[in-house]
Image (spheres, helix red, strand yellow):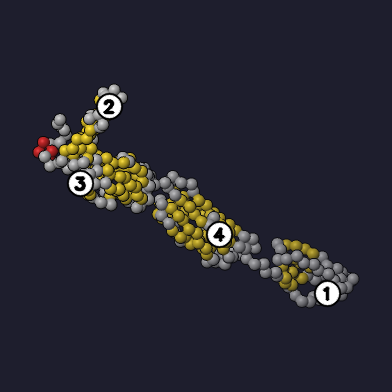
Amino acid sequence: MAINFLPQLLLAQYTKQYTYDKLNRLQQIKFNNAPVVSYIYDELGNRTAKTVNESGFTISPKQLVVAALANSKATFAINSSLAWSITSNQSWLSANTGSGNGNATITLTASANTGSDSRPALVIVSATGFKPDTVRVTQAGTTNLLTASPSALSLLSASESAAKFTVSSNIAWSVVCSESWLTLSQTSGFNNSEITVSANSANTGSTNRSATITVSGTGVSSQTITVTQAGSPFQPTLFLSANSVIFGPSNVSTATLTLTSNMNWTATSNESWLTLIQVRELGIVHLL
């Protein structure tokens, strides 16, 4: 019986073996103990199938998937009694060994796939004089990621008050702020980064003020950070324009005092002959 896929000169280098079942029917033809041709029979003794293993070995599984991360790994098994070699058609995928003899478990290692699409590779297993076999490997594409934390920051009322937030990402991103009184140490970047937020002016008002920072990237949801700057501490003031006034001798005499304040106040007289009249103008009060 001729094995057509093996050159005749190469056949002489291998030990050919025949195995038979209990009924003396030919079951397998082996070369160097590697099954090459196998036969299957039905219950009546009729041969129903003939399989030819042109590789001289078997590999399993023949399809693998690896993650997008660097150093992602997958394994397959070689069942063989022959010497074999392994090559990859892609530089991003490598095997833990390039050759061996007999059975083995092969570990494949992939470099990072920074693209969003998956990518394929073929691992080729060969034995001299036999038809090569392949393992198809697919590396997943990178899922775009973008997070910013914390989602809220607090600043003191003073100018140059600062706080920080962290951007975690595997893509390019940009940062914008809704208010001009806030300064960012960085407005764009790639991958992870820590950004300092600082107030370029004091909040002189008594109430808090806020700004929104938005971090954006392609193919991901934007992240927002709320920044609150505290108001200035309340400093109560109450001033009179003079400590004393003099009235004329007439029946109805008037004098004016100016009171300046940023708080509630009351004014009283300790004498019944003195009447106070309040006039309010732009936060300044005149007492007549």
Query: In the image, which is nearer the foreground, mark 3 or mark 1?
Result: 3
**Spatial CA span between label 3 and label 1:** 123 Å
Q: Is residue 12 left or right of residue 283?
A: left
Q: How many marks?
A: 4
Q: In terms of sequence position, does the residue under pointer 4 or pointer 1 come before the other?
A: 4
Category of crowding for the residue at label 2, using alpha-carbon neighbours closer than 10 angstroms: few (below 14), some (14–19), many (at least 20): some
Crowd tier of the residue under label 3, counting other residues whose Cα lies within 10 Å: few below 14, some 14–19, many 20 or above: some
Kind of residue indicated by mark 4: Leu
Query: Which of the two labelled residues, at mark 2 and mark 4, occupies the earlier sequence position?
Result: 2
Residue to which mark 1 is pinned: 247
Residue at the extreme left of the image, as rendered: 9
Q: Earlier in the sequence, mark 2 or mark 1?
A: 2
Would residue 287 appear left or right of 23 to someone viewing this image? right
Spatial CA distance of label 2 from label 3 is: 31 Å
Going by the numbered disc 3, the residue's amino acid type is Ala
Instruction: Assess disc 4: are there few (<14), some (14-19) or many (≥20) residues with their C-alpha within 10 Å of its C-alpha.
Output: some
Cβ atoms at labels 2 and 4 below 8 Å apart = no
Query: What is the secondary structure assignment of the residue under circle 3?
Result: strand
Residue 165: where, in percent of width, then height?
Answer: 50, 59
Q: In the image, which is nearer the foreground, mark 2 or mark 1?
A: 2
| Residue labelled with disc 2 | 41
Q: Residue furthest front?
A: 22
Earlier sequence position, callout 2 versus callout 3: 2
Is residue 68 among what the camera can see? yes
Residue found at x 88% / y 73%? 271
